[in-house]
């Protein structure tokens, strides 16, 4: 059942076994997992089915460190920030979860093997109909043979893209699971239900009630046995801080850890590979490739765990983005085609015609490639276009830093609640990892005689802020981190808030470290794990 | 890094030409060096011949060499550098083979020099430095 709080009578009280606060990847996953069970689930979501400016504005806040897009980086509607998602899936690896002496505050209370069965289920939840093949089998199925890279330093890394939901570029959790939530007799989704207050018991060991309100509309009270925060890496921390403020303590903040260790993956260009010849072969190897099943796989590189350990580096991965060759036949043909679409002849027709004639084979291949992919022949970019250079684009892990944190601001939102303040800080380890990783990519491609590498100028200038070039990815991580010891974190290995008996957190805010992998699959895996634990408890 | 102002920064094409020139030079082998100056002159001449118009006068290599030496003062000893790269008495074929092997080893062991952003094998950077030390700009 899906209701809208704006249509309910003021003062409605809803009784449930489990209250999920937030309807993004984590909240929808838990609700979907418990749909049809005996657990009475109430999922409250601040937004509706569509984007609304007024609701979205509740996410506004202040950045006091490196800039954080507090509004633009999150989405407040059913499906949450998965509406930003490109469907790029990857999993954390063993070293990502281990305590690394060279990464302060690293180490999960879970082993990687404990996540594996949940990753398998998470892939299904993310729309993959068939089990994932191994990397080697995937490459084989794609017909890709990679060059002999030194795997002590670098190793191939594969991202699998989800199938796309209709009208979306990726798997759309809200669209995919809305019918199941609508039909489930034990699930009530309450839209436009924004957090207003937690009421805790006197000893602050339990949440007694949750009050939600519609903007300018009625409020309702949820009385549940258990509560799960599923609001994303920034809002989870904010609601715990608000809960502690409203109740005079508790809410996992006994050791002032809530909101600390705020991290994001950063992504940006760190170098350029340049060749005198065309990189046609490389483009068939390190690229986004479509398999026979229609699904896309991206082949890139990652730092080998042995090297991370030997040199004290963070994890990182690299994708190649090919830069079009302006002298290629297809570039000339595109110029002519675009000019004709605009109703005139292109300039330098003679020269362009010569380029087309000299490049007829490549041109025919590129046209076939684009037609097969259903893409426009005139589209910008190097897809199917022979290239002599490629940008190395890194996805970089961030080291946990307690000074990088989310706090409450003095300003208040339209619900009367204190807005968020983000003080995002990055350190030198990120820069060193980026420089070393890019240099090693350059060394390997030079050794293989494929291309020469030049680092981006920002990476050569120690004074240039990392975030000038490496941009935030909206992967908000670490603010309610997992730790067995309450002094080191906010939730335990099961996502239960330390010091509280019926409050849990789901989402990337509980990751102690983020690795380099896109977080959605891990968010879903951990949400499935939590759902399994809540099922008998709530029943 | 104020000293950088002494040198024009080589561009992408310059460095590509330089890399090509070095590759060509190693392929052809270089003359037996009697003195360091003769060795540098031979290398310069050989680079010109190998790269022709694309190599120009080798200034791109010398600029990279100058930038490398700013960050690597221990390689500023010209006699040591020349002895390291092209010991006297070796045949051109042997010198070329040695340099080729060293560059390959540099890549394998990640003995790298970042010069103006370019990822160079250490030996490549030292060849550039040698040209800077003994080439026309040093006179």
Image (tube, coloured by chain):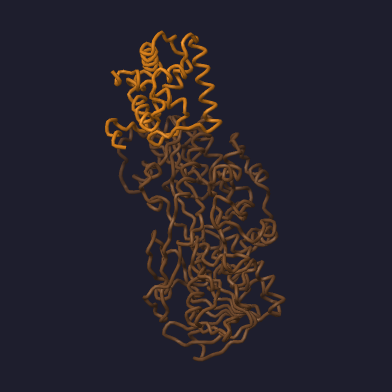
Chain colours: A brown, B orange
* Quarter of image, res A60: bottom left
Classify A46 as above or below A275: below
Which residue is located at x 45 percent, y 42 percent? A391
Classify B6 as above or below A457: above
What x and y, as percent, mark residue A167? 51, 63
Q: Is residue B19 in sight in this rendering? A: yes
Which residue is located at x 39 percent, y 17 percent? B47
> Relative to the observer, which residue lies in front, A425 or A434?
A425
> Relative to the observer, which residue lies in front, A523 or A8?
A523
What x and y, as percent, mark residue A121? 68, 62
What x and y, as percent, mark residue A362? 48, 35
Q: Is residue B47 left or right of residue A95?
A: left
Considering the image in quadrants, where does the N terminus of chain A appear? bottom right
Q: Is residue B122 left or right of residue B108?
A: left
Considering the image in quadrants, where does the C terminus of chain A appear? bottom right
What x and y, as percent, mark residue A96? 60, 53
* Quarter of image, res A354: top left
Classify B38 as above or below A52: above
> Relative to the observer, which residue lies in front, A410 or A445?
A410
Q: Is residue A91 in sight in this rendering? A: no
Which residue is located at x 39 percent, y 15 percent? B43
- Number of callouts in the render? 0
């Amino acid at each position: 059942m899906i209701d809208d709080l704006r249509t309910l009578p003021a003062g409605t009280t809803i009784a449930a076994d489990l209250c999920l606060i937030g309807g993004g990847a984590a909240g929808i996953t838990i609700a979907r997992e418990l749909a049809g069970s005996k657990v009475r689930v109430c999922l409250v979501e601040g937004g509706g089915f569509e984007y609304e400016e007024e609701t979205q504005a509740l996410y506004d806040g202040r950045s006091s460190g490196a800039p954080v897009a507090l509004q633009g980086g999150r989405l407040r509607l059913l499906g949450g920030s998965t509406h930003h998602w490109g469907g790029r899936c990857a999993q954390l690896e063993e070293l990502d979860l281990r305590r690394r002496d060279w990464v302060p505050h690293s180490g999960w209370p879970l082993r990687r093997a404990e996540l594996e069965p949940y990753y398998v289920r998470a892939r299904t939840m993310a729309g993959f109909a068939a089990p994932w093949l191994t990397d080697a089998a995937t490459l084989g199925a794609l017909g890709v043979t990679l060059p002999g890279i030194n795997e002590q330093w670098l190793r191939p890394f594969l991202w699998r893209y989800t199938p796309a939901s209709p009208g979306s570029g990726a798997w759309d959790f809200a669209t995919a699971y809305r019918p199941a939530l609508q039909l489930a007799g034990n699930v009530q989704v309450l839209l436009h239900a924004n957090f207003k207050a937690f009421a805790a018991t006197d000893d602050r060991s339990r949440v007694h009630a949750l009050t939600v309100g519609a903007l300018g509309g009625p409020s309702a009270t949820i009385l549940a046995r258990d509560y799960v925060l599923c609001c994303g890496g920034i809002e989870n921390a904010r609601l715990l801080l608000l809960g502690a403020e409203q109740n005079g303590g508790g809410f996992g903040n006994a050791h002032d850890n809530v909101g600390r260790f705020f991290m994001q993956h950063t992504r940006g260009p760190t170098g350029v590979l340049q060749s005198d010849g065309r990189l046609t072969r490389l483009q068939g190897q390190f690229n986004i490739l479509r398999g026979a099943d229609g699904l896309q796989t991206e082949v890139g590189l990652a730092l080998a765990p042995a090297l991370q350990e030997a040199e004290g580096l963070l994890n990182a991965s690299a994708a190649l983005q090919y830069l079009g060759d302006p002298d290629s036949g297809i570039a000339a043909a595109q110029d002519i085609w675009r000019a004709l679409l605009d109703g005139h002849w292109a300039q330098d027709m003679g020269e362009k015609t010569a380029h087309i004639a000299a490049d007829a084979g490549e041109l025919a291949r590129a046209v076939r490639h684009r037609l097969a992919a259903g893409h426009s022949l005139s589209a910008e970019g190097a897809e199917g276009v022979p290239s002599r250079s490629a940008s190395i684009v890194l996805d970089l892990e961030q080291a946990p830093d307690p000074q990088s944190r989310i706090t409450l601001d003095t300003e208040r939102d339209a619900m009367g609640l204190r807005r968020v303040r983000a003080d995002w800080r990055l350190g030198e380890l990120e820069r060193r990892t980026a420089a070393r990783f890019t240099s090693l990519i350059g060394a390997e491609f030079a050794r293989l005689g494929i291309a020469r590498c030049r680092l981006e100028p920002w990476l050569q200038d120690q004074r240039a802020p990392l975030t000038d070039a490496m941009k935030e990815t909206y992967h908000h991580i670490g603010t309610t981190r997992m730790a067995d010891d309450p002094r080191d974190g906010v939730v335990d290995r099961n996502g239960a808030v330390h010091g509280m008996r019926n409050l849990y957190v789901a989402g990337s805010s509980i990751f102690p470290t983020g690795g380099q992998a896109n977080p959605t699959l891990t968010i879903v895996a951990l949400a499935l794990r939590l759902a399994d634990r809540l099922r008998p408890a709530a029943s | 890094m104020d000293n950088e102002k002494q040198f024009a920064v080589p561009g992408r094409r310059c460095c590509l030409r330089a890399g090509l020139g070095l590759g060509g030079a190693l392929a052809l082998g270089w003359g037996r060096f009697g003195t360091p100056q003769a060795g540098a002159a031979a290398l310069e001449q050989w680079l010109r011949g190998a790269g022709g118009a694309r190599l120009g006068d080798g200034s791109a290599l010398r600029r990279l060499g100058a930038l490398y030496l700013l960050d690597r003062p221990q390689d500023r000893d010209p006699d040591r550098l020349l002895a390291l790269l092209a010991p006297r008495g070796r045949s051109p074929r042997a010198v070329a083979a040695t340099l080729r092997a060293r560059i390959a080893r540099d890549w394998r062991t990640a003995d790298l020099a970042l010069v103006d952003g370019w990822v160079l094998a250490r030996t490549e950077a030292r060849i550039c430095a040698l040209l800077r030390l003994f080439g026309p700009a040093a006179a």
